[in-house]
Amino acid sequence: MTKPKLPLWLIGSVVLSALIASYSVYKRYQVESENRATSLAVEFENLESLASAQGISIDKALIDLKAQGVNAVVMSEGTVGELLAKGQATLQSTAWPVTTGSKPHMEPMSILTFSDTSQVPRAERGLRNRFQSLANRLKGREPYILDLPPVSPMLIRTTPIGLDPQQVDVAKRNGLLIIARCANPPGVSEKGVRQTLEWAHEMGATIFLPEGDQVIGRRDAIRTTIKTLNDNSMSYATPEFAKIGGDVNIVEADPGNVIRLHSAQIAELDKLTFADAVERFAKASRERNMRILLIRPFSLAGPEPSSSLAFFIKKINEQIVKEGGAIGLPKPYKEPAIPRFLQVLLGLAIAPIIWFCVATFVTNRTVRLIGAGLIGLLALACAVRIGQHAMAFFASISFPLLGFMVAEELPEFPLPKWLQPLPTFVLICLFSLLGGLCVAGMLNGLPFYVKADEFKGTKISVFLPILAVGVFYLSRLGDIKKTLASPITWGSIVLGFVILGMLGFMIARTGNDTGASASGGEIAFRGILDKVMYVRPRTKEFMIGHPLLIVGIGLLGFLKSQRRPDSEEEPTLEQNRVQLLAGWAALAMMVGSMGQTDIVNTLCHLHIPVVLSIIRIGLGAVLGCIIGLALWTMILRLLPKVEA
């Protein structure tokens, strides 16, 4: 492998990539800036229980919550069974004489008798929606008696009967947004799906939130769900972290009508301190673009449970506003106004960079030419989504690696020895940042804001550059073939296992759904960083990656300064120690490159506000630089001194 020469066309490609990616990211920033309002919502049933326990009316409780920022209420459909439980109706099973052909027989029948006659129209409509043609048998013999369809009494009990009109009236007179929760009853027809959602809209709901394990209409009527929501100007609330059947289908098919919602179950809140619970909701709004926060009580017991919920919400409101957010009505994100050809132009600008990185490791001319053709075709394929994903993936690998290659050409600056690694470190970080911006600029669109689509190949893009950097510097600081052919020592074996273990642990911890969780100490350390910093930088980035990179850069500079012309004289002990540093320098550069892949990976989280990601990267670089320079200053005193 020869030392790379940086042609002018490569510099032009880097500059052009930076300009196009920056423009695309700026359009994304505009969209995010126009949609910062977060809605605070509560469940009506929870609030009703707390208010009654405190001895106040539901209206008084809602007035208190509105004063703390609540502007939405979640209501679930009622069922016939709930009417029975409340004593508003009774269900009686009987038999009805019918004649089929010439043989009379008794057919099972149920009779629903109401003590609250205001519930009769609601129950009748719900039964007709649920049983469709069978409901033709449904008759009202008196104003408060319904003869029901010939179905099991259990099916009658579980029949949804829409939102409670009394609850709806309370929400409307208090000026609250209504979020309707509807289940997916077994066997519901397309007509039933449409009627259920239209009924919720008639009652005043403007947002639909699924209830249970499936979205209504899952699977074969999901298109009816999407169409009905659009026809009635209802948005779809997708719950974060919830595994709900059909949720992904709606989010992917109609991202322009999606609002992301965050909540926490009572069991989850029970494991948190009050401050941590407040921080959880505030971070969901600020760091993950959650536009609805469904807040449940932090404590179910107390002298004033409703007031306790109001205080909890007040603190969440204050934290959101303190961190630059706003409380208001939620709305879906819009598509950024980006010309369709922009991704193709960005792909064409990135293509030479990818080819240069590949050509550094591939010496065969034919393979290089074939690679150039394939990369060019891939750039043109950026007109479609699969091409954009592929080019973003290769950009995430190429830019960090290119930063290390460009650093080889950087002249030595007249700085104190302890500060000499700084310019090279900054340059490498800038290339990694540019790689992340190219990913964010290429994969820019509404589906990425709501996680209907996301960056693919996270683990590979994080670790392949690390291995490439290791090979790159081993080839420059020594002979790889001789190294591989040399005898293996116990020290080499132990070091190899340590490196493999560390990389394996990083692989397990990379991504949103990981199999390795943070330790209690790490969680506590993160909590401290969250409190003292605007946004928490990644721990392995500023604690490991950046410091080791600065040490590696410093060692490379030291080796260059001690380089001697070839001589037949026997090398001295100090000269041998200098040669041993070459392997440690390559290892430090390799492990240190994990901080650079983390920079790219931070911007690959496309549902996180882009400004927040850039600030996170900047803070990590500053902290890592301080730690790294301090470490390098100590190492400088231990380095061998070789006479000229």
Image (cartoon, rainbow, N blue to C red):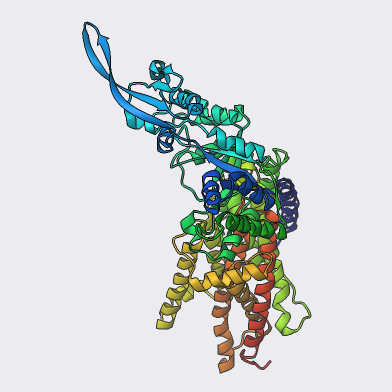
Q: Quadrant of the C terminus?
A: bottom right
Q: Is residue 5 visible?
A: no
Q: Quadrant of the N terminus?
A: bottom right
Please name whichever residue, 517 or 35, is drawn nearer the observer in this view of the structure. 35
To which quarter of the image does residue 140 belong? top left
Q: Position of residue 590 (x, y in %)?
A: 56, 71
**Residue at the extreme left of the image, as rendered:** 103
Q: Position of residue 10 (x, y in %)?
A: 71, 56
To which quarter of the image does residue 342 belong? top right
Please name whichever residue, 37 or 479, is drawn nearer the observer in this view of the structure. 37
Up/down of 629 relative to 236, above or below: below
Q: Position of residue 154 (x, y in %)?
A: 33, 32
Residue at 50% of width from left, 66% of height from top? 506
Up/down of 366 relative to 642, above or below: above
Up/down of 114 relative to 606, above or below: above
Residue at 53% of width from left, 74% of height from top? 479
Please name whichever residue, 442 or 121, is drawn nearer the observer in this view of the structure. 121
**Residue at the extreme top of the image, as rendered:** 102
Q: Position of residue 388 (x, y in %)?
A: 61, 44
Residue at 72% of width from left, 84% of height from top? 417
173 displayed left or right of 91: right
Please name whichever residue, 230 or 276, is drawn nearer the observer in this view of the structure. 276
579 displayed left or right of 636: left
Q: Is residue 226 visible?
A: yes
How many callouts does the rendering have? 0
To which quarter of the image does residue 104 belong? top left
